[in-house]
Amino acid sequence: MPKRDLPPLRALTAFEAAARLGSFRAAASELGITRSAVSHQIKLLEDRLGISLFRRDARRAELTTVGQAYFPTVRDAFDQIEAHTRAVRPSAVDNELTIQVYVTVAIKWLIPRLHDFERRFPDMKVRLSTSYVDWDFDERNVDVGLVLARNKHPGHYYAPLFQSMLVPVCSPKLLQGESGLRKPADLVKHKLIDVYTAEEDWQIWLDAAGVKDVKPANRLAVDSYILAQEAAIEGRGVAMTIGPFATEEIKLGRLAQPFGLRVPHRHQWYFACLHESRKKSKVRRFEEWLVKQVASDPALSNYKIPGKAA
């Protein structure tokens, strides 16, 4: 067997920490060494590879183009080593992660992606805590949350993920015939499907669309967006979505988006946890994984938060 051509582990460790944290100083603090030691190890790695991994004139540890390409491979390798090391330890602890997530988001977005998280971290045991009505982060019963935060608490950490956008959907059948939906004003002829825990959604959208004659009585109330979507599929009326959670149904032709108007909701989708919990490996793993999932989802391209880099 040929000898492995691997860079020194210390140099790789310093590079991974500096690239992940965006700072030589932060990497030094995490690794328990000096900033100059981090810089020295990264220089050794660069000499070994014959390339520059960081721009030295930047205040932050800014990766070069080659460094950006190299970092994901090193990070994923360290993640795998860490995960499998934890898995083989007989006394592995704190490997259960309870995630708070709204039921529609769980079914339509998160669950289809969790297999990737479980593949990357086979030692983790994931539990979902779903709800129809709880929006705020439940610090007593969960580790992390993917929440539409309405009230932010000082002891909680919130990382914005994507914008909540109000978008009506309906059965394609409602687009047909003389009374078919062609413009927002046509909604006066149809039943609106309300999520009664978020009654303001329709009013926000209707105000933005300039529609004022929809009768409150001409509505069907349900307790979740997923039920609203199912009722819309059955042709019971027009439902409101608050994200890309009808994407698959639209692709399959079960739902249609009758209007191009997307209206920003009052709140955004966040990753949430306790401030002190961010130091835990399991929380850091999930946050980093979740951010990557959001960034790589083409369906979320229209839901980016204004002013937030992709």
Image (spheres, rainbow, N blue to C red):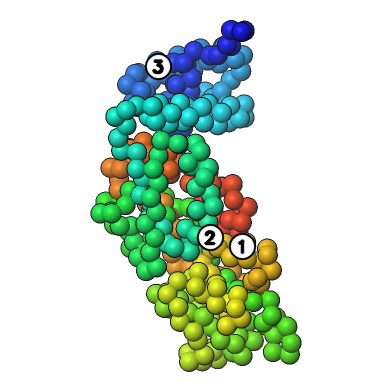
Q: Is residue 33 visible?
A: yes
In the picture, residue 230 is in which quadrant? bottom right
Horizontal and vertical percent position of residue 109: 53, 56
Kindly identify the residue that appears in the image at 51 percent across and 31 percent down.
76
Kindly identify the residue that appears in the image at 65 percent across and 66 percent down.
250
Q: Which residue is mark 1?
A: 247
Task: Report, in whole angstroms, how far the alpha carbon at label 2 lies from the one at label 1.
Answer: 9 Å
Q: Is residue 8 above or below residue 199?
A: above
Q: Is residue 194 above or below residue 106?
A: below
The disc labelled 1 sits on which kind of residue? Thr
Mark drawn on residue 223: none
| Lower sequence index among marks 3 and 2 | 3
Identify the secondary structure beneath mark 2: helix
Q: Which residue is mark 3?
A: 36
Task: Report, in whole angstroms, how far the alpha carbon at label 3 lies from the one at label 1.
Answer: 49 Å
The answer to the question of whether label 3 and label 1 lie on touching residues, with beta carbons closer than 8 A, is: no
